[in-house]
Amino acid sequence: MQYKSQAVAKPYFIAAIGLFVGQILFGLIMGLQYVIGDFLFPAIPFNVARMVHTNLLIVWLLFGFMGASYFLVPEESETELYSPKLAMITFWVFLVAGALTVLGYLLVPYATLAKFTGNDLLATMGREFLEQPLITKVGIVIVALSFLFNIAMTVLKGRKTAISLVLLLGLLGLAVFFLFSFYNPANLVKDKFYWWWVVHLWVEGVWELILGAILAFVLIKVTGVDREVIEKWLYVIITMTLITGIIGTGHHYYWIGAPEYWQWWGSIFSALEPIPFFMMTVFAFNMVNRRRREHPNKVATLWALGTGVMAFLGAGLWGFLHTLAPINFYTHGTQLTAAHGHMAFYGAYVAVVLTMISYAMPILRGRAANSPKAQVVEMWAFWLMSVSMVFITLFLTGAGIVQIWLQRVSDTPMGFMAVQDQVAIFYWMREGTGVVFLIGLIVYLCSFFVKSESKVAA
Amino acid sequence: MQNLIQSNSVSTGIWLVLAVLTLLTFSIGEAGMAGRQVMLGLLFIALVKGQMVANYFMGLRQAGFWWRALVLFYFLIVGGLIALAYLMGLD
Amino acid sequence: MNSQSAVMVYEPQAVQAVSREEGLPGDFAIWIFIFAEMLAFGVLFVAYAFTRAGNVELFNASQQTLSQTAGAINTLVLITSSYFVVRGVAAIKRGLSEQCAWWLSGAVLLGGVFVAIKLVEFHAKFAAGISLSTNAFYMFYLALTFFHFMHVLMGMIILGCVIAKARRGGYSARDHVGVETGASFWHMVDLLWIILFPLVYVIR
């Protein structure tokens, strides 16, 4: 570790992994509820499990991004963090607020939670992914602002690199677009229109800048390739990402009452969204092939390459499958969307956070890399999780295609619930691969506790 | 040095040809001409202009054969599909 | 890096290999960009043509309201600016930074003329109450020309940066990848307009 204050990243990473475990457990509960509808009812109804599954994902990724930033920015800026104390305060505030929110979801009926938390003052609850109570939303804004302040001050007082500037731009966008979660117009078209400004412009816009910056940082460290080369590619990739991602928002505007031209704009620009992901994959492999040093942390390199490939498959290819308006007419809101969502989130964001953790955690624990034995265990975890995610995606795609056929394309369309019975076999297989994913995650956790017989020189 | 002076006069020549072709396109339009042959003619002019810009101005002449072929294919495919769509519209 | 006692192998060719692949002029990264942009415009052009096939009368009638003269002048303006850029690149190849900057400045000036003419056109259309939702032709006309317009602005910014560096003597007869990179982008803007002009303004 080059700077003492980088150590604040450690609790963030630990919290992220802890919440990740929670997310997967609720995913498995919900996956079972797809086929055994009353499983754990009434203790954990499906809608609550879903809310916890998705909210935990977002929160743990945010923890991961914050930890990554606290690790990355001092090193890039070549200076200590502006205020490690503030970073620790925001950590506890965020963790406690997150835990209380999840407990609120689980213990109190949602309507009661809304009443307790001042939803009457400003109605922001009840929208997918943005279910958080008003006070949690305000808390998120405060945490995000203090985090941004801390990072920005560090960047300003130190060296300014392309990586930290792109990261800062991404984090700023993350905070700004979250503000649209407070705008909840009664007009349903407007409601959806701006809802996507949070949801889409996060995951297909500013988060990709964060992803690009983190990936570029790790690649510089593990490959030793010239900064200028990596930064140039970072610029090209993020420019393409922003152009295609921002106008590509149109692929959510096809059927919600927005003007018709969005069908053209959305189709064409989001059809190009795979290009930056493809470039990112080519870029990652290219840099690793051209490496100028053999970094002892092999598994971090594996995660970095995995990010490129899985992000291209999940976000790029599976997104393209149903992004064109004439196809999306039949496919929107089916299990095909769920398939895309799973692999895209895993490939792009889960993988990049785990890449960073894989690179940074050994350093935070006082060594350049984990012992070869621990690395092999972590590689097993990588393959178990990645391969099972591919199968989860394939089974959901199968379910989606059958669903689209029976429910949308057919001359005698079946009802939603009747179709759900028809695709039960896919849900069972998905649940099975979900269990494999959990095993992969447990192996991942174990990799942190593998005793190193011979420490690599620090 | 001699080469460079030559290449400057080549690019000046290209520029003049491009200007003449533009005026040709313009006068075809102003004359209100339409129809299959006119459409194909205009697309052909665009193809020629595009090739001149790509090969002489952009300097793809010095680049590998496949890069030049790529740009040519682009023009042929885009132009071909445009022509196809126009012919469909004529029926 | 005190935590990395790893072996360093120095490879001076590495940087060179990225910046000049296959002899394409300028930085290879800009070419990825250029091909991606050409793809995007290509799809838009073809989409325009096929949408027209279903609404020939509407497209022809709406097309009549465009100013062919403005379109043709803008074509000449862009072609000439491209020619200036070619001369700018030729100048720097002889090590003439000052001349290079002047030629490129001329190109940017012509870019400004293009922008001005285009703004007058846009203003006329908006003043007539035409928007993206008026009909399919205007949707494509506005979308295509606006998207292209943004590229002209982008190209002007890029050339502006190149000019600033050239004036500082940042390029030489041997090292002028930056000039070629900016030039390639500008030629692409020209190239796309060469298709756009006949397609949207002239062919009926």
Image (cartoon, grey):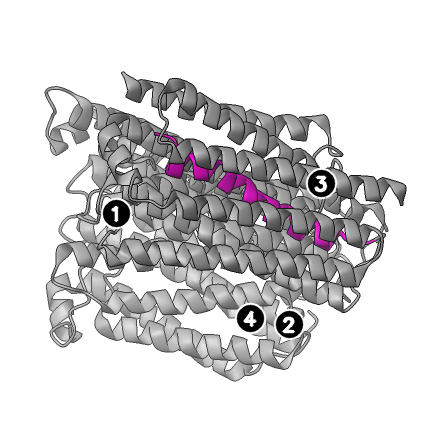
Q: Which residue is mark 3?
A: B11
Residue A235 appears left or right of A32: right
**Can you tell which of label 1 and label 2 is closer to the viewer?**
1
Q: Amino acid at mark 3?
A: Ser
Tag of residue A70: 4
Q: Are marks 4 and 2 on the same chain?
A: yes
Q: Which residue is mark 1?
A: A253
Q: Residue at x 40, y 34 (%)?
A: B29
How many C-alpha atoms fall within 10 Å of the one at disc 2: few (<14), some, or many (≥20)? some
Above or below C85: residue A72: below
Q: Which residue is mark 2?
A: A160
Tag of residue C165: none
Q: Secondary structure at mark 4?
A: helix
Q: Which residue occupies the foreground of this view, A58 or C154?
A: C154
Q: Which residue occupies the foreground of this view, A259 or B8?
A: B8
Q: Residue at x 49, y 48 (%)?
A: C74
Q: Which residues are magenta?
A: C175-204
